[in-house]
Amino acid sequence: MATPFTPKDNPAFILHGKLDTSYGTLPVPEVGPHEVLIEVQETGICGSDVHFYNTGKMGLVSCCGSMCLGHESAGVIVQLGSALAKRAEASRIENGAAPAGAHTLQLGDRVALEPGTTCRMCSDCRTGNYQICEHMEFAAYPPFDGTLQRYYKLPSDLVYPLPESVDTIYGAMMEPLSVAVHSVANVGGLRTNQNVLIMGAGPVGLLAMAVAKGLGAGRIIGVDINADRLAFAKSYAATDTYIPISQKEGEKRADYSLRAAQDLLSTLRIPERGAGSIDLVVDATGAEVCIQMGLNAVRPGGTFVQTGFGPPDVAIPMFRVVTNEIKIKGSWRYGSGDYPLSIDLVARGLVDLKPLLTHTFPFENALEAFELTRAGKDKEGKPVIKCVIHGPQ
């Protein structure tokens, strides 16, 4: 049987539709043999949460009915399923009172949550690409409830113990960091000393820069239209920054994006090909002009990774893509190995999450946290990069 557990109530922050939220109470989840119940202690607000809050939808996906928000979370294990309880007990007998280590979960472990369960049976799951499983049940992605509640359950292999050097609040930021790790390291295949262009200096773009730096990239170029964001990016992880030139009146978007890419290369003295050119582009914006600009800037034979959301359909410079054998790849959430690498990068001091955590709120002020994230700046004019909600207590 599962470990004994006396639950409290399970308060949750619930979205009913566009700009329509309330606090409610959800049933306490019942764990299966290989599942754990986590008491959620920290939850970050993601751009997708804000999209659903602002509009009731994200891209082509609409929120139908009520849904608990949140998916960037960390917390403490408060219950083990029956199979896990047996394993934990056997480990205690074998090892005495000492914790069993990373491979045997114990009550009280602080863990980062990978908030999406899959079928584990389809060809995608069985080949390690579970992030594109058609049966994915992902937190705060309609119709599934998210993690902005007291209790949340997950299979045991989707929670990751945090080392003592990593505070729980930064454990919640492993989710967006894993998105960046997936796009830069896994999909992008970054190698040491390669040059990287990151389009967009929002949270995901900044984390992509940090991952590139942590993995030993050469030049890391951040592009954004916001000078304050770029100033932060330069102090945080970027070696170079660039604000795109203005579009001329009547200039076609495709012509402008080509001209802007050429100006970027010229301004930063980056060759179009060969040594010193741009090996990898990661677009964290989803904006058509940024996608076009990135494809025009990457070297022949280089890689372009799309991780940001924008319009469902965009125009791209296909002739250049074909004749220069540019590899275009989509990057969706995270996959096998991305969470462990994220935790390792932070634990070893190769990625510093502290400068990104700009605002925190108690659970009772979750709506205020969403409004602040939506606004992008607080009353003092300080930019919001990452906002985290504590609790519920």
Image (cartoon, helix red, strand yellow):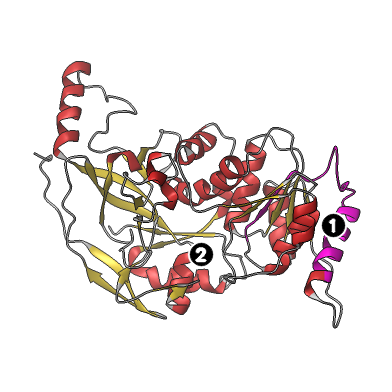
**Which image quadrant for residue 306?**
bottom right
The disc labelled 1 sits on which kind of residue? Leu
Mark 2 surroundings within 10 Å by alpha-carbon count, few (fewer than 14), some (14 through 19), many (20 or more): some
Residue type for callout 2: Gly
- Which residue in the protein does label 2 denote? 47
Between 111 and 16, the one nearer to me in the picture: 16
Residue nearer the viewer, 6 or 175: 175
Q: Residue at x 85, y 39 (%)?
A: 274
Which of the numbered marks, if any, corresponds to residue 343?
none
The quadrant the C terminus occupies is bottom left
Query: Which residue is located at x 87 percent, y 77 percent?
Result: 248
Secondary structure of residue under mark 2 = helix
Quarter of the figure that contains the N terminus: top left
> In whole angstroms, how far apart are the C-alphas of marks 1 and 2?
27 Å
Q: What stretch is highlighted in magenta?
A: 255-284
Q: Do the residues labelled 1 and 2 touch (CB within 8 Å)?
A: no
Q: Where is residue 334 in the image (x, y as percent from the top left)?
A: 48, 47
Drawn side of residue 313 relative to residue 332, left or right: right
Residue 66 image-quadrant placement: bottom left
Residue linked to disc 1: 264
**Within-10-Å neighbours for mark 1: few <14, some 14–19, many 20+:** many
Circle nearer the N terminus (1, 2): 2
